[in-house]
């Protein structure tokens, strides 16, 4: 089926009380794994690309691969820009065919974040594209973005309300204790803060840096209004473990298909597991 907007997926998630998984892609095998997993679980899904993915694979390749994969499944698929940091980049992705973009103005003071987000919203609304905003900073590294742990700031509920009222974004990414990359210990999410934010803003909440967060914590976050959960590191880990296992067993292997095939299967399994945790299985 044709790709859909993320707003459509999140609206249904709101009604059903579940979260839609947003999985980062970098190449064909990852796109195939994400769509295959969603198809097998009869789940809506979000394929998302970061700045690093766009640099690596190319904007047109990512759109073409996702559009083709979406056309071959019965489940609804959205294509989302993850952590867009400029107006120009968001517009490029909208023009290329993304059905959703994130404008990450979290590094700016609140007034500047609002101004930047509204600038993107003006173009996105005209094109029928979903917009995700962000308030608060996550520690860790994701592609070209690095935030030192001591600089990570949790989202202030009152500022979240001001931001949402001033912009009208479709979804809000918040910082409540998750981080990008691999965790050194078990993350502790600030659930009372999440509850306070959700009670004020009344729109779908997005949880970034969710790889490594315990399953029960993710389920609790969903019960408190999280409707989109981002997974990147876990997908990479599944990919690389499977590839390394093949090469360890067959050091002289030169057929990429025999390495990437098992990696794709491992990623499919991982994405299926996350979909079940998020509660979106059989919600297509």
Image (cartoon, grey):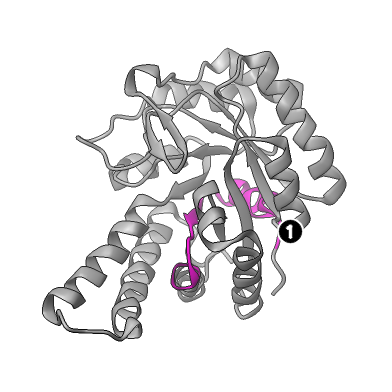
Query: Who's the residue at 38% across and 37% down the image?
Result: 141
Residue 5 versus residue 132 in the image, above or below: below
| Range of magenta residues | 4-31
Query: Is residue 184 in sight in this rendering?
Result: yes
Residue 125 image offset from top left, x and y in percent: 83, 43
* Residue 271 image offset from top left, x and y in percent: 39, 63
Q: Is residue 215 above or below residue 184?
A: below
Q: Quadrant of the C terminus?
A: bottom right
User: 278 or 50: nearer the eye?
Assistant: 50
Q: Residue 187 at x, y = what percent?
A: 27, 33
Name the residue tied to disc 1: 96
- Residue 19 seen anywhere in this rendered image of the structure: no
Q: Along the line of sight, which residue is nearer the eye, 53 or 263?
A: 53
Residue drawn 51% across and 67% down?
282
On the rendered image, what quadrant is the N terminus found in? bottom right
Residue name at image x 48 percent, y 55 percent: 24
Question: Count the marks: how many?
Answer: 1
Label 1 crowd bin: few (<14), some (14–19), many (20+), radius 10 Å: some
Of residues 244 and 214, the one drawn nearer to the viewer in this rendering: 244
- Residue 66 is one of the magenta-drawn residues: no
58 sits left or right of 282 in the view = right
């Amino acid at each position: 089926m044709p790709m859909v907007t993320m707003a459509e997926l999140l609206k249904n998630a709101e009604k059903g009380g579940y979260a839609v998984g947003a999985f980062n892609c970098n190449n064909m095998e990852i796109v195939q794994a994400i769509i295959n997993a969603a198809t097998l679980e009869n789940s809506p899904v979000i394929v998302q690309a970061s700045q690093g993915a766009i640099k690596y694979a190319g904007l047109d390749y990512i759109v073409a691969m996702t559009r083709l994969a979406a056309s071959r499944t019965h489940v609804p698929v959205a294509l989302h820009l993850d952590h867009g940091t400029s107006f120009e980049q968001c517009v490029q992705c909208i023009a290329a065919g993304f059905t959703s973009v994130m404008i990450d103005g979290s590094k700016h003071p609140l007034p500047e974040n609002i101004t930047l987000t509204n600038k993107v919203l003006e173009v996105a609304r005209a094109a029928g594209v979903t917009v995700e905003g962000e308030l608060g900073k996550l520690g860790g590294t994701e592609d070209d973005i690095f935030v030192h742990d001591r600089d990570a700031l949790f989202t202030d509920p009152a500022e979240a309300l001001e931001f949402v009222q001033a912009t009208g974004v479709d979804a809000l990414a918040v910082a409540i204790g998750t981080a990008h990359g691999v965790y050194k210990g078990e993350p502790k999410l600030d659930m009372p803060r999440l509850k306070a934010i959700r009670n004020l803003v009344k729109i779908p909440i997005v949880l970034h840096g969710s790889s490594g967060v315990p399953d029960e914590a993710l389920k609790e976050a969903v019960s408190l209004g999280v409707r989109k959960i981002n997974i990147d590191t876990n997908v990479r880990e599944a990919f690389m473990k499977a590839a390394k296992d093949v090469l360890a067993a067959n050091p002289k292997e030169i057929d990429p298909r025999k390495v990437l095939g098992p990696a794709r299967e491992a990623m499919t399994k991982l994405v299926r597991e996350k979909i079940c945790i998020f509660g979106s299985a059989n919600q297509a």
